[in-house]
Amino acid sequence: MDWSTLDFGPFLLSFKLAGVTTAILFIIALPISWWLSQTKTRYKPVIEAVVSLPIVLPPSVLGFYVLFALSQNSPVGAFFEDHFGIKLVFNFTGLVVASCFYSFPFMVQPLQSGFENLNRHMIEASYVAGKSKLNTLLNVALPNIKPALLSGLIITFAHTVGEFGVVLMVGGSIPGETKVASVAIYEMVEVMDYRSAHLYSAMMLLISFSVLLGVYLFNRQHKRHLGWRDD
Amino acid sequence: MIEIAVRKALIGSNGPMKLNVSLEIAEKSFVTLAGESGSGKTTLLRILAGLEKAEGTITVSGKKWLAGPRSLPTQKREIGFVFQDYALFDNMTILNNLLFVNKEKALADHLLDLTQLSEMKNRYPGTLSGGQKQRVALCRALMNRPKILLMDEPLSALDPAMRSKLQHDILKLHREFGTTTLMISHDPSEIYHLADRVILLDHGEIQNDGAPKEVLLHVKGSQKFSLTGELLEIIQADVIHIAIIAIGQQIVEVVLDEAESRLFKAGDTIEVSTKAFAPTISKAKDKVQR
C-alpha cells in the first residue's frame, strides 16, 4: 500500500479544530454548568432547553443559522469584519465558532450532571471552612467530578471530530482551511476513490475507539484509586 | 452569648409548618437539639451555619450574623459543621482534608493524634470505615478553631461501641477547643453523657428546654420509673399473658391479664411504668423469739 499519496491534512485539521473547540468550550461551559447545577431560578428549564438545542437540531439547520448570523450581511458578521478585520465564514475561525455552538451541550451536560450528583454537603463543608465559591469550584467540585469532566472533554472532542453538516455549511471544503476528515471522506466517495475512503474511515474508527476505551479505562482506575467499590 | 430568634416556613414531612425558635445559648456550653424527625432541628442548625435563609436575628458575641435581610455569609461565620454523612473531600487525603481548611500542620497533627488517626493520614476517605470518617469530619470541623461547632447527628450511623468511644472524643475536643457546641441527637444516653442542656423541638417550636436529667426523665405524677418501648408480641401462657417489649437495645417481659392483653397489639408504642414497689413481708426473727 502506498501511504505517501495519502494526505493527512484533513485529519490534522479535524484534530486541530476539535482541540481548539474543546479548550474554548471548557472555559465557557465550566461557569455555566456550575451555575446551572447550583441555581434555583425558575427559568432554569428554559436555559437548559436552549443549551440542549444543538443536540436535536439537524446540523444543516444549525449550520444555516450560524452561516446566516456570521456572514458579512448580518450585524454580527459585519461588526467583526469592520472592527477586527475577521471574516467568520468559510475559514477556520468560522469553523471554530460554529463547532462551539454545535458541541456546546456535549460539554455542559456532563459537567452539570457531575456537579449535580456531587454531595451537596461536600460543597457546603468547603463554604463552612471559609472557602470562596471559586476556590470550592476549583479545589473541591472539579476534582471530584473527574470522570464527568473527562467525559465532557472527550465527548466534545470526539463530537467535533465527527461533525459534518455544520462544517460543510459554514466552512465549505477549502483544503488546509476548512476541509476536515469527514468532509474529505464524503468527497472521496463522491469521486469514487473508495480505497482512500476506506483508509480514512478505518483510521477514524480506530482512533475513535481508542479514545473511548481510554476514557472508560481511566474512569475505572479513578474509582479504584479513591477506594470506591467497583460495581 | 449566642442569641437566636429565627422564623422560617418549611415543608416538613407532615406538610407545611413554621419554624419559630427563640433562645439564648451560653458560650462554651454543650447543647443538644432533640425531637422527632421533621421537627426542624437540621434546619435550625443550617440556619445558624448560614446554609439556609431565614427571617429574624442571630447575634453571636455581639456580632450580627443575621439581621433582617442582611446575612453574614457562611464563609465568615467561623463555625465548624459535622454533617450526618461526613461529607469528606474524596479527592484529598485525610491530612489534606484538614489542611484544606487551614494550613496549620501542627494543629492537624495534634487533632489526628488525639483521635488516633495519625497512621491513616495519607489515605483517601473512600478507604476508611464509618467511625474513622466521622473522626476525620470532626477534626476537619475543628481546624479553623470554630466559635461554634454544629453537629448533625454525628454518631447516628455508628454501632454502640464506636459511639461511646467517639462521645468521649467529642467531649475531649469540645473542652480543649472551648467551642460552643450544638449537636443534634436522638440517643438519650448520648445526650446525658455530653450535654449541659437539651432543647426539645416539636413541629418547629421549642417544647422543652432544660438540663438532660429534667428533660429526659419521663415520669409523671407518682410514677417511679417510666420507659417507652415497642410491643413485639403477646404470648398466652395458661391463664396469664406475657407481653414481649423492646426498650432501647433490650427485650423485657411484662405479665398482663386477660383484659389488658386485649387492649394492645404488636407494633404499638407503649409506656412501661410502675407507681410503687410491692412491699415484701418476711418474719422478723428476733421478735418471734422474744
Image (tube, coloured by chain):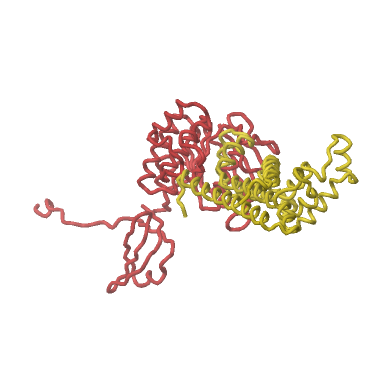
Chain colours: A yellow, B red
Which is more toward the observer, B208 or A18? Answer: A18
**Residue A36 visible:** no
The residue closer to the viewer here, A110 or B138, is A110
**Residue in front for this viewpoint, A176 or A85:** A176
In the displayed structure, does residue B244 sit left or right of residue A7?
left
B57 shown above or below A230: above
Residue lying furthest left in this view?
B289
Q: Residue at x 42, y 69 (%)?
A: B263
State whether residue B133 appears in this view: yes
Residue A9: where, in percent of width, then height?
70, 44
B174 on left or right of A170 = left
- The residue most toward the front is A2
Q: Position of residue B145 (x, y in %)?
A: 51, 29
Q: How many numbered markers are drawn?
A: 0
Where is residue B287 drawn, in percent x and y?
13, 52
The answer to which image quadrant residue B73 occupies is top right
Q: Position of residue A131 (x, y in %)?
A: 59, 34
- Position of A74 with respect to A9 (left or right) is right
Towards the viewer: B283 or B45: B45
Q: Residue furthest right?
A: A73
- Residue drawn at point x = 47 percent, y = 29 percent: B178
Q: Is residue B105 above or below residue A149?
A: above
